[in-house]
Amino acid sequence: DPSRAPSRDSRSDAMLRSSGRASGGGFEARRGDLKTKMLGSGGGTPESENAVQLGLAWLADHQWQDGGWRLDLTDGPCEGQCRNSGRVATSTGATGLALLPFLGAGHTHLDGDYRDVVNNGLYYLKSRVVKTSHGADLQEGTMYAQGIAAIALCEAFAMTQDPELLEVAQGAIDFICYAQHSAGGWRYFPGRPGDTTVFGWQMMALKSAALAGLEVPTPVIALAERFLDSVQSAQ
């Protein structure tokens, strides 16, 4: 019965509200007894947890004195000793990517063995914000970085409800909403026709924002759904 089908707006709201928390998809499963339970049921082992700790230690060792990270490893703490250096010059994107594993492992700027590392990383992101009438611009040349940095800020706020993160996290989301193309997608620069890779990072940021209780306009999500409909293949 078409009259009983959910409207696009209601489906959009449902997509943002659904967090999968019953199966550990929410931020609360990153710490404490629930984390232990989810590790046990999801195949986690002492070896896998040790690998996570080694990875976090490597990231901490490669944090710059200013609190950020860089993809280019020829400079910075390791002084070029590490192989396979990147070349993309986006410190906000690199810092967001580096912060996410710490947050995923339950470390925040208020709690955990790496709270100073996380705090300095968040401070760096805040210091790189370009304030605009459309929100907090963290692009440094690409909307990839905007989405990645926004995810880290939203997750840190969601896990701590620290009021000092509220404005910058919401501002990063506001800028993503502003940057959406009229057909619903996102690309490398604000307002450009979308592609699915840049699109994905922005949607992940919007989802993290919704879980954090931040404002995510329903029309933005409805328009994003239309974009995905327009690029799907019947194959």
Image (cartoon, grey):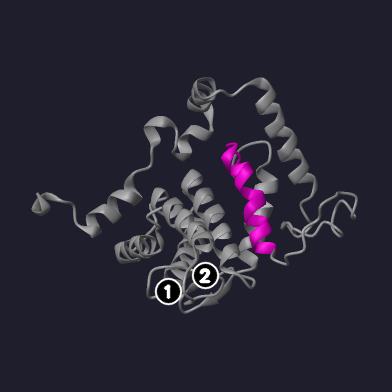
Q: Which residue is mark 2?
A: 187
Establish if 235 lies above or below 181: above
- 40 above or below 209? above
Residues drawn in magenta = 91-109
Q: Earlier in the sequence, mark 2 or mark 1?
A: 1
Magenta span contains residue 148? no
Residue, far bottom: 133
Residue 71 appears in which quarter of the rendering? Answer: bottom right
Pointer 1 residue: 181
Q: Residue at x 66, y 27 (%)?
A: 48
Q: Main secondary structure of the magenta part?
A: helix
Give above or below for 178 relative to 95. Answer: below
99 part of magenta stretch: yes
Question: Does dot 2 land on a helix, a strand or a loop?
Answer: loop
Picture coordinates of residue 66, whole percent (x, y): 75, 60
Task: Check if mark 2's residue and mark 1's residue have beta carbons within 8 Å.
Answer: yes
Cα separation, mark 2 vs mark 1, equals 8 Å
Residue type, label 1: His
Above or below, comparing residue 210 to residue 89 in the picture = above
